[in-house]
Image: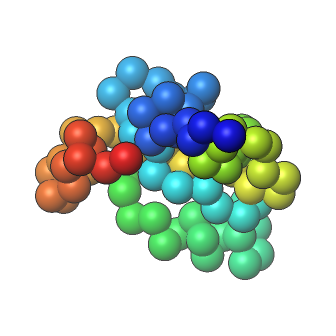
Amino acid sequence: MARNDFNKHHPELRRGEFFVTNISGSDNISGSDWTDWERITHKTKRRGKIAYDIYGKLMCSMIPVFAQKEELKKTGIDTDKIS
């Protein structure tokens, strides 16, 4: 099975965004899931709705997190070199 690069092709990406990670949780983050959300320090972070693994399979009980590429670049992360 081929790997899908969700850093660049996640179905929920908006213009100028980058896929950061998947975290445990749902639309209403609370409890220990809130800790996962808080660990992501990007000010432009945004929750998505549907999480996928590297092969494009759905990941239950997970949500994707996105952030603006410009913010990541300002923190020294070169989004063009991440695969």
For the point 40% across and 39% down, the residue is 18
77 lies above or below 3: below
Left or right, residue 36 beside residue 5 = right
Q: How many marks?
A: 0
Residue 72 placement (x, y as % from top left)? 26, 50
16 lies above or below 64: above
68 lies above or below 31: above
For the point 58% across and 64% down, the residue is 37
Q: Residue furthest front?
A: 1
For the point 76% across and 75% down, the residue is 31
Residue 46 placement (x, y as % from top left)? 52, 44
For the point 66% across and 69% down, the residue is 34
72 lies above or below 32: above
Q: Is residue 69 visible?
A: yes
Residue 69 placement (x, y as % from top left)? 29, 39
Q: Residue furthest right?
A: 60
Left or right, residue 19 beside residue 30 = left
Look at the image and tell me in which quarter the N terminus lies: top right
Q: Is residue 26 visible?
A: no
Residue 16 placement (x, y as % from top left)? 33, 27
